[in-house]
Amino acid sequence: MRLSFFVNDVQTEQIGYSTTRLAHAASARGHEVWYISATDFTYDPNECVMAVARRAPVKRHATHGAYLAALQGSKAITERISVDELDILMLRNDPSTDTGLRAWAQTIGLTFGRAAMRHGVIVLNDPRRLLRAANKMYFQLFPEEVRPKTLISQSPKDIRAFIEEVGGNAVLKPLSGSGGAGVFLVRIEDSSNVKQMISSLTRDGYVIAQEYLPAAAEGDTRLFMMNGQPLRYKGKYAAFRRLSSGEDLRSNIHAGGKLHPAVITDAELRIAEIVRPKLVQDGMFLVGLDIVGDKLMEINVFSPGGLGSAQRFEKVNFSHAIIDALERKVTYMAHYQRNFDNAEMAVL
């Protein structure tokens, strides 16, 4: 299979990234694996999508680190390839990291991915639906039953009123962004800084105000979904738990959160079942659900990470399950002469 990963920049990829794990696993099976950065695409006058792509020299790499070093090194293979002739293009960039002068790069993979779809390339996740999920408003399209009570506004007055309505404890965060950046916890006993928090967030755009869930003090659970189902391999769920550190609300690892094994209960599986129909409808192949108690806090549809953390606790390599699924999709398309809608193929 000819597989390519679209990333922000090949040279900024890291050993621990889930993309590195997936690419290494696919390469180890003998698949032709390419990387494409945001600046690499070309739409030719003959209406073909091309790209200057990189891949590691064809050899077995003992570790993820060795594979990535070969990919980023001077001996990497660089070619101008036809994206239209790929079997699969996986969109694994993080739009929130492309800001300022690189804001143009946030949707470039979606743009060229949609063009490649016309020639039967399987593009994951479906770029048409990903465009709708470009900010956290997408989260509001899921059933209220699994979401915390939420207000999205730029009005300081409305935000303050919402905080009072939910009892004085709330979480404030930017509508755009990821990784816990710009997240504030408002507590009823210390409201002196609320005005400053709101001012800081509204200066950069719309604000999400959510009711505070007491269970958040115990951290959150990341559960991976694949093909609309909880990702399970060799009887183990691809999941892990993140606990916040000290007074920091955020459980993100870069914010000091600690990793722990996850115990997947009926509560997590119930949430997964409720969100499943829309994930399938939207062609979301690989997704990360962030769950607090019996509520869904976030749905990560752009390059969800943490496969290595799940593997560390569950002692199984979930990358193999994902590559298995990709191989099946390519086989399906071959049997049916690529006669499937991309969103349908994404979750078959």
Image (tube, rainbow, N blue to C red):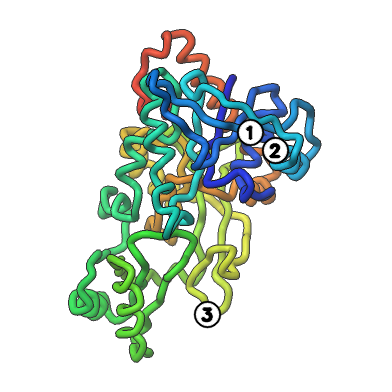
Mark 3, secondary structure of its residue = loop
Nearer the N terminus, badge 2 or badge 1? 1
Task: Classify 10 Å Cα crowding around label 1: few (below 14), some (14-19), many (20 and above).
Answer: many
Q: Residue at x 33, y 61 (%)?
A: 175
Residue type marked 2: Leu
Residue at image mark 3: 247
Nearer the N terminus, badge 2 or badge 3? 2
Q: Residue at x 35, y 66 (%)?
A: 174
Camera-side residue of 334 and 82: 82
Q: CA distance from mark 2 to mark 3?
A: 40 Å
Residue type marked 1: Arg
**Quarter placement of the N terminus:** top right
Residue type marked 3: Glu
Residue at image mark 1: 54
* Above or below for 211 versus 28: below
Task: Classify 10 Å Cα crowding around label 2: few (below 14), some (14-19), many (20 and above).
Answer: many
Q: CA distance from mark 2 to mark 1?
A: 7 Å
Nearer the N terminus, badge 3 or badge 1? 1
Which labelled disc corresponds to residue 343? none
**Quarter placement of the C terminus:** top left
Residue 321 at x, y percent in the picture: 59, 32
Residue 156 at x, y percent in the picture: 22, 77
Residue at image mark 2: 71
Q: Residue at x 50, y 30 (%)?
A: 89
Determine if residue 345 is in view. no
Mark 2, secondary structure of its residue = helix
Q: CA distance from mark 3 to mark 1?
A: 43 Å
Q: Contact, CB < 8 Å: mark 2 with mark 1?
A: yes
Q: Residue at x 23, y 75 (%)?
A: 159
Q: Which mark lies nearer to you, 2 or 3?
A: 2
Residue 189 at x, y percent in the picture: 37, 89
